[in-house]
Image (spheres, rainbow, N blue to C red):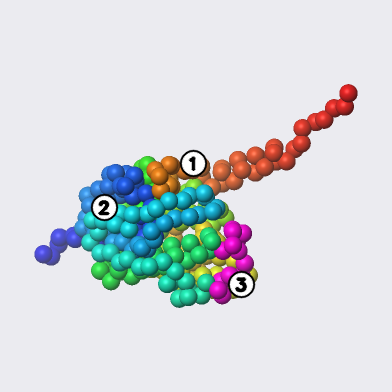
Amino acid sequence: MKGISVPPRIAICFYGITRSLRHTLPSIEARAIGPARAAGEARIYGHFFLQRRIDNPRTGERGELDPEEHRLLRPDWVELEEPDLCLAQWDFEGLKRHGDFWDDGFHSLRNLIHQLHSLNRVTAAARADGARICLFLRPDLEYHDSLGPAIRRAQRALRTARPLVQLPWWQGWNGYNDRFAIAAGDAAIAAYGTRVTQMAAFCDETGGPVHSERLLAHVLERNGIPVRTIGARASRVRIEGRMRYEDFLPTRLSNLRRGLRERLSSRSPDKTTS
């Protein structure tokens, strides 16, 4: 009916592996799904890998995964994929020639390709359905704060016809935190969600290896997407339910504290002789 404003369609997009969803689901429902549904028409999308075990030498995380755990989200759309099939698509071997940022035998690079491929697939589904706002969420995070304020800010951005990506202000690592995001407008949704397509170009332009946070900053800046940082917090939860410690200070303050610690640790204690 003319004169009636229809709320924009909201897509709640999950990707990767569920890992610890049985532990994180209450926070996801209360602080992400609930606020999204209160703001308008919201649908849940998921792309997940049929990974049956996790064995990460860098984090020490090991254990069996439940391939049916994604059902807890009750997704409106879901796609499941076997691991490793995406590596050739995104030229894993070619990316390796640019170096191993994490110095762990390219294990973290392999994981990043899987993560961004999964994000790309779920983004395609949300865009095909006409989503105007996307919440890009990892299912293995405990969300400590409501995303309601960020969703309402995204709605205001749409009314001004300007794209917007909202990202956590903590742990930018000389780029942008890629733990979760709220994107408004198709240009913002596409830039954030399809950045796997820009990995090779990032390496060519920077002359270095892929780095997740720096890649995100590179892509958003190249596409002219305004970024607003927000204080919403989320902690990684390992397979057995153990929550990782996170530094939630704004990146600038976190870097200052880290630098101070490094300077203090580099000082050797005064030695006296008897």
- Front residue of 273 and 265: 273
The location of residue 272, given as percent across then percent down, is 85, 27
- Look at the image and say whether residue 99 sits in the magenta stretch: yes
**Front disc: 1 or 2:** 2
Q: Are dots 3 and 1 in contact, CB under 8 Å?
A: no
Q: Earlier in the sequence, mark 3 or mark 1?
A: 3
- Front residue of 30 and 40: 30
Q: Give the residue at x 30% y 66%.
A: 79
Q: Give the residue at x 69% y 37%.
A: 264
**Circle 2: residue type:** Leu
Q: Which residue is mark 1?
A: 245
- Look at the image and say whether residue 119 sits in the magenta stretch: no
Which of the 4 image quarters holds residue 143? top left
Q: Residues within 10 Å of mark 2 (few under 14, many from 20)?
A: few
Circle 3 — which element?
loop
**Which quarter of the rendering shows the C terminus?**
top right
The location of residue 142, given as percent across then percent down, is 38, 45
Q: Which residue is mark 3?
A: 97
Q: Residue furthest left?
A: 1
Q: Which residues are magenta?
A: 93-106
* In the image, residue 28 above or below residue 206: above
Count of marks, rendered view: 3
**Circle 1: residue type:** Tyr
Circle 2 — which element?
helix
Q: Earlier in the sequence, mark 3 or mark 2?
A: 2
Q: Residues within 10 Å of mark 1 (few under 14, many from 20)?
A: few
Give the alpha-carbon distance from disc 3 to disc 2, as whole Å: 40 Å
Q: Which residue is mark 2?
A: 72
**Circle 3: residue type:** Arg
Q: Is residue 195 visible?
A: no
Q: Residue furthest top?
A: 274
The location of residue 268, given as percent across then percent down, is 76, 36
